[in-house]
Image: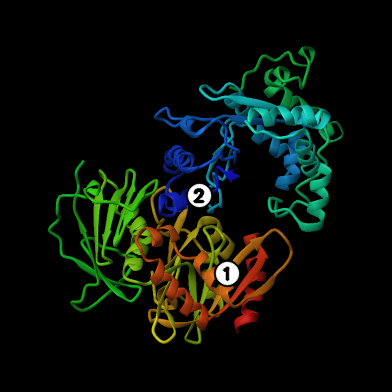
Amino acid sequence: SLIASSRYILDDAAGFESSNLLLDEVDDLRPALYEKISDEAEETVFTKVHDAYTFLPDGRPLLSVDATLGAIYLLRNPLDIAPSFANHSSCGIDEIIADMNNVKNAFCATPNNLPNQLRQHLLNWSGHVLSWVDAPNIKVHVVRYEDMKQKPLETFYGAVRFAGLERTEEEVVSAIKNSSFEYLKKQEEEEGFCEKGAKCASFFRRGEVGSWKGVLSDEQVVRIVRKHGIVMRRFGYISDEENNDNVLPARDSNARRAVKSRKYSLYGLTVSSPFQCPELVPAKGRNKDITIKFGEIEENRYDWNIEGLCYKAAQEKFFLSVKGIAKYLVTGGSEIIIEKHGNTEDDAVRLFLYDTVIAAALMQRGLLPLHGSVAVRNGKGIAFLGSSSVGKSIIAAALNERSCSVLSDTLCVVDFHRRPMVYPGYPFLMLWRGGAKILGLELQGRKPVRKGLMKYYFPLDGSFHNQAVPLEKIYLLNSHNREEYTFTPVNGSDKLFALQDYIYKETLVRSMGFENIQFQKCVKTARHTVIKRINYHNDKRRLGKLIDFLEKDFL
């Protein structure tokens, strides 16, 4: 099954990092994302959703009707939710009640950090319930948590039939046993559970119906019932007598420009640009490896091997369209055409250029771009590979404060000349506000990477390493919620498979026909480098402990 809000699903389909989009721009892509998943599915796809059933400004439902056969809505008494979710969130019950009563409540909506999930509008408790159970144009089957506890076979069978699954009673009984609260709690105690909050003792707490009675104060009960009494009464959580409060929650700027081109050094190449890129290192000489220019792009004139949500790709060609910002066409690893949309700010245009567009050009030139950051110590490169939000940039920044210079952030670009070499990228780090705060870095006067994003440029200045270096070690970042800091050596063919997992936008490699080239690069890189998986706590506030652990390994 899928999690509808998983960031990696959108990043993979879009062909670029969704972290460079504003929250509303991400929402605008989500209906098409689910339609694409539905169109490509050979069988029913079961998807976990936290979002309320909401609509975009243009009237489209966020969760596309065209991609939805139906929904099984799991409902629980809000009085029991309050203490349970307070435990999961490691915060006070009053704080959770305030969230449950807040119609603007949302998961992953803070601008300070990059969560691994997309923003999810929750509304308040009543608003969430009504958005689904009264949703137009989709079939909804409501399952009360209390019914699953009190009459599990009947309740579970109803959901199975609604989902169109043909299962015997024996199979249903087995499924109920393996998903029982007691079974899962024991499993968590023995093996851990991936969704447990960093601070809470356990994900599976009590699971009892009516457990609120010994926990909530009278004032807390009144706050919940007064706000949600009508919906609670509708689903049998309170009687008519217990609720007497009738409160319802519920341009063309792409003419060719006569400007002098500017040259910049990037990943060992010279890039010629018609606009200023103040974040980059100026280059000297007449050579031009990659030329950027403005122009109109007629993407429909080409035959594409693959079409993603926002990109298209073919042999030696890559097209990217970011709604409201720009279109980009990369050809032969030597030319990038940009067609701006309207009066888009140059900062936004450059941001997507620096990301997937440049990565596509590097692939077309036969280089191996891996998803990671590179630090340098004693003239040797140390790469940290990982998915979005795992902490690559903040690790590079912390090492830069201690013992290392920084070669690149976001992309670890490898080529092979007798041994794997890594090349200097952008002379800055990009840090979310929360990460900068953890590092003790001042934000006043810092330039955001794009208006509206709480993500900032931090120039490396003298600590930027601007020469290629041999790649000596690779750490694969694996964060978890346990108090364990360990290294796991990666050996043999597993080294090759691990590197392939971290090729930047691996789907682009296949769609542009570079599988064999990238495979050979991975083989040679694996043969000449030490690769370890580092397992560490996902709480970034424990960064110092992680850096201490790392430095003991490579100092």
Q: Secondary structure at mark 2?
A: helix
Q: Is residue 87 left or right of residue 382?
A: right
Q: Is residue 159 left or right of residue 316?
A: right
Quadrant of res 324: top left
- Which residue appears farthest toward the right when viewing the image? 214
- Residue 311 is situated, as x and y percent measured from the top left of the image, at 35, 50
Give the vertical position of 144 relative to 431 (above or below).
above
Q: Quadrant of the C terminus?
A: bottom right
How far apart are the alpha carbons under marks 1 and 2?
20 Å
- Considering only order in the chain, which callout, 2 or 1, is on the residue closer to the N terminus? 2
Q: Amino acid at mark 2?
A: Ile
Q: Give the residue pinned by disc 1.
A: 476
- Residue 339 is situated, as x and y percent measured from the top left of the image, at 24, 50
Give the vertical position of 86 relative to 400 (above or below).
above
- Residue 381 is situated, as x and y percent measured from the top left of the image, at 49, 80
Residue placed at 33% from the left, 53% from the top? 305
- Labels in figure, total: 2
Mark linked to residue 263: none
Quadrant of res 212: top right
- Residue 23 is situated, as x and y percent measured from the top left of the image, at 46, 43
Q: Is residue 97 left or right of residue 181?
A: left
Q: Amino acid at mark 1?
A: Leu
Q: Quadrant of the N terminus?
A: top right
Residue 189 seen anywhere in this rendered image of the structure:
yes
Residue placed at 74% from the left, 64% from the top? 483
Q: Give the residue pinned by disc 2.
A: 9
Quadrant of res 43: top right
Q: Secondary structure at mark 1?
A: strand
Q: Which of the two residues, 355 or 109, is positioned nearer the viewer here?
A: 355
Residue 427 seen anywhere in this rendered image of the structure:
no
Q: Is residue 93 left or right of residue 65?
A: right
* Few, some or many residues within 10 Å of mark 1 (<14, 14–19, 20+): many
